Amino acid sequence: MGKGPKNKYSGLKVLIMGLGLHGGGAEAARYLAREGAELTVTDLRDEKTLAPSLEKLQGIGAVRYVLGRHDMADFERADMVIKNPGVRPDSPFLRAAKRVETDISLFLAGCPARLIAVTGSKGKSSAASALDWALGEARKGGFLPGRTFLGGNITRSPLVFLEDLEPGDDVVLELSSWQLGDLGEKTRPGGEALLKPRAAVVTAIMADHQDRYGSMEDYVADKRIIAAGQGPEDVLVAPDDPWGRSFIRKGRPLVYAEEPLPEGTAGGWLTGKDGPGLARLTRETPPVEVVPPRLLLPGYHQKKNLLAAALALLDLGLPPETIREALGAFRGMEHRLEFFHEAGGIRFYNDTAATIPEAAEAAAEAFDPPPVLIAGGADKALDFAPLVRAAARVKALVLLAGTGTDRLRPLLDQAGLVYRGPFNSLEEALRSSLEGAGPGDRVILSPGCASFGMFLNEFDRGRRWKEAVRRLCGAG
């Protein structure tokens, strides 16, 4: 069981603002109901849209629902408001609240386990999942006590497992810029930072969410909160580039790169697409192999993500050979270059989490021969040049409709690149992608855009893509 006092929220009037569909709002409600809080749930979306989350709340006791709107009086009456990460921090409703928390801050306040936190623009889910996998494999081998848990932005609220945690356990927490921004400078009663990870891992920093942030600096400033509370005993793993180095403020830095690091630099580097990943914990120690030359995951960018995970694992005390063997057996995760179906010799991949153009470009470059790429969707005020470069090398480009696609098409036309669509459904895009595709080809959904409008979120897009392929392409 968790180590915090029982029913510490008993009698508090708590308002859940933004039930959402990723689980954070629902799990906060379940946790707080167990802790004795008086709950109200409010969301701008209606009951039909929120049905999956509302179903999770059945049986937790009396909950008052205000759906399709927010009432200012609810915020003024509440002792505490639980904010969904998607709600902008400058909301006038939040300004009326006495106290604002999130499912992540509730979790951190009661977490007794060692914490490994991961953020970045792209690759954070892969790195977090690889950390979870490798720590689990190390425990199977008897190198560590306790258990490993994975949660956060990866669509699993850590409140799910808070009550099961013990001091000997590890928690890998994936954190978005929005979640980190919500934590801000929150501290424990004694003044220590609420977020103080033993290892903080930063994956590639690229332009993202510029429809919400005023600049890249504002966006990265929220991400830097991941390391702000670290002390000299903690480790920070970050890319050896200007944005990555901007995270180095406290703790012990380990940087990583695609090229060998200068002599005397602690960190890791790759030795080419067909070579291993090497690492050294201190300036004086010789490098050791921590990432094998060949992985089960496609794409050079994934090898870099696993190198970041390997550096954290090495600092946490895992032997290099244990890290290398575990990462060599890691198969990746759902929605990230996920191979899920084969029919007629054509292999189908789900990369719906590629919500920025650079991610779609990396997916296109991960395969040889060039794949059929399904891309496009909603706009996030990003630079589409990487997606245009991707279009120049793929076998065929099929576009989904959306505001981002509307911006992309003139750039493709200007470059003289051919595309099909835009289509208003995944089924139409799939049928078009199969024209001219044959045995040995790969068809990849890697949108490079957000999912708003046509889908509930990017994970809904990925699930519906897999359903469409299995339905239209038959048994694999």
Image (cartoon, rainbow, N blue to C red):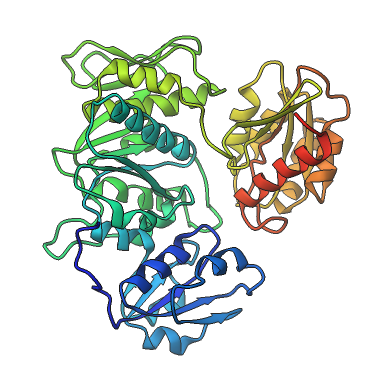
Q: Is residue 266 visible?
A: yes
Q: Quadrant of residue 262?
A: top left
Q: Nearer the viewer, residue 7 or 177?
A: 7
- 230 displayed left or right of 157: left
Which residue reaches farthest left? 190
- Give percent across and percent down for residue 460: 64, 51
- Give percent across and percent down for residue 450: 63, 50
Which residue reaches farthest front? 59
Q: Quadrant of the C terminus?
A: top right
Rendered residue at 71%/20% (across/down): 370
**Number of dots carrying numbers:** 0
- Give percent across and percent down for residue 474: 81, 34
- Give percent across and percent down for residue 85: 45, 61
Rendered residue at 70%/59% (across/down): 453
Q: Is residue 239 visible?
A: no
Q: Quadrant of the N terminus?
A: bottom left
| Image vertical order of residue 415 relative to residue 290, above or below | below
Rendered residue at 28%/17% (across/down): 320
Q: Nearer the viewer, residue 300 or 34?
A: 34
Which residue reaches farthest right? 435
| Image vertical order of residue 5 relative to residue 61, above or below | above
Q: Quadrant of residue 124?
A: top left
Rendered residue at 67%/41% (across/down): 447
| Image vertical order of residue 4 relative to residue 436, above or below | below
Q: Quadrant of residue 374?
A: top right
Q: Nearer the viewer, residue 1 or 114?
A: 1
